[in-house]
Amino acid sequence: MKNNAEMKSKNSLSSCCVYFGEDKNDAESLSEKFVGLKYADGKLKVYFPVGYRKPDESNNPPEKVEKEIRRNILNLIHVLKAFGEKNDNLSSSPLIAKNQKTCFPVHAYLFIIRDFLSNGYYVQKENLYSKSPFGKASWSRTIKSVKPQFVDFQPFYFDFITQKINYSHTELISQIHKFCVHECFSKLGFLFSSFMPEKSELKLNKNLFIAAIKKAMAQTFNENTLLLFKNMLDVLNFLCENSENKEFIYGTQNFHVIWEKLVDCIFGETDKEKFYPKVYWKLKGRNDDEKHFYLNNDEKRNSLRPDTIMITNREKSGQKIFVLDSKYYRYGATKINNHLPDSASIVKQLAYAEYIEKNDSIPEKIKHHRTENSIFNAFIMPSCTEQIESIGYASANYVECPENTEKSWHKIHGILLDTKTVMEHAAKKDNELIKQLANAIEGNC
């Protein structure tokens, strides 16, 4: 028989988390590329991105570790929702269990859990009206329905139409809500507590439930109630008649796109398109209007597009421009040389920086403070280091040859950023992180 320590370890929240490189035996090899949540056979696995730091379980009590893991998972869900592509829910991916084409409504589940913890079960209210001298009067109904007595030509009411609110715990909508609450807690309730609400006596009748909620939505104007109903509909639409415990996957196999967005959101300038080098064709045998053209007026095809432009001391003396290329590469976790950016990425970074140094189309006030050695290049890669770390630099022999004067942008610095820190600082610029990153790049020139 297993001892209590073994049982506790097996059932702990940390046992469902998979960090990069840990789960080599996963049947679907999700741990190498997939980031997100996978629920199957009544069990949940959470796959964190490359470089995400595992909580220190050796020096902290289990309660503190569990609390941190809950916060990490909720932050992961938030980042996937806020920065993921619309198609990244894997709604048509072959990785979906049993090839079910469904999109798991993770935010509907979380909304219903949070709403229940704040407000309890939904209780249907019914307004009852009756003629009585006591109670809260409904004056509009009283004036329409009760004949007044006149004294000195003034109307007096001795009976009123009064309002009474009847709270019903047995109405269908209340029971459907109870069903949805249990369903949500059964999958994601562990993120909030070990509490499990009782199961509704109702069996899933999808068509009936959805019709009842839609009817109730048409009869209420309360925004909070409407939001609750909408999320209940999302949960019910996810479920099917034959399986209330459907397997699901929520996440992405393209976290490199999210990594680029996270870095740009924290460090980047909003007008970076002004720093894009443009390309064009000039064709023989065309008139002047046709021979010099950009491809289909398509910004993506016409421009080399650096991921992020970061500027410190913008439009002031001492201004620095940093051209950042976010690479969701594994070097920070593996330290394998082949997991570093390749020649194509290096050459593009040099082209970006040279354009910014020489071109006159960048913003005038920025151009005024531009100097030969105020432009810097860097690759930004994920890692589990708590401090921003420089690992060296990349360059090309054609810019480092003796006849060339070395410039600051000739070196493309390899910078490791802590994945967890980046995800926790998402959705806003962070001046302190910008300062730390600038120092890490400049300090190694």
Image: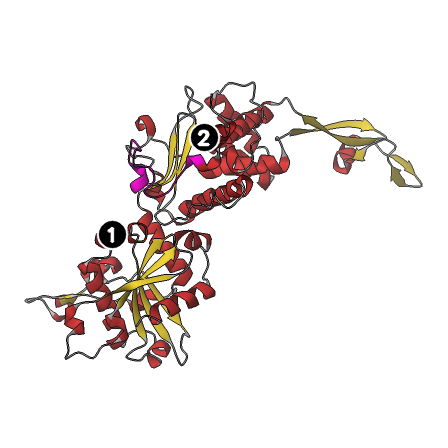
For label 1, the residue is 336
The x and y percentages for residue 359 are 25, 75
Q: Nearer the viewer, residue 306 or 221?
A: 306
Q: Is residue 79 visible?
A: yes
- Pick whichever of labels 1 and 2 is earlier in the sequence: 2
Horizontal side of 267 relative to 294 (left or right) equals right
Q: Which quadrant of the figure contains the C terminus?
A: bottom left
* 299 is higher (above) or lower (below) than 183: below
* Residue drawn at x 94%, y 41% as measured from the top left: 152
For label 2, the residue is 10
The x and y percentages for residue 251 are 37, 40
* Residue drawn at x 30%, y 34% as measured from the top left: 92
Q: Badge 1: few (under 14), some or many (20 or more) residues near its Cα, within 10 Å?
A: few
Q: In the image, what residue type sits under mark 2?
A: Lys
Check disc 1 and report its element: helix, strand or loop. Answer: loop
Q: Nearer the viewer, residue 21 or 7?
A: 7
Q: Quadrant of residue 40?
A: top left
Q: Badge 2: few (under 14), some or many (20 or more) residues near its Cα, within 10 Å?
A: few
Marks 1/2: CA–CA distance? 33 Å
Horizontal side of 166 relative to 435 (left or right) equals right
Check disc 2 and report its element: helix, strand or loop. Answer: helix
Q: Which residues are magenta?
A: 15-33
* 191 is higher (above) or lower (below) than 408: above
* 350 is higher (above) or lower (below) than 73: below
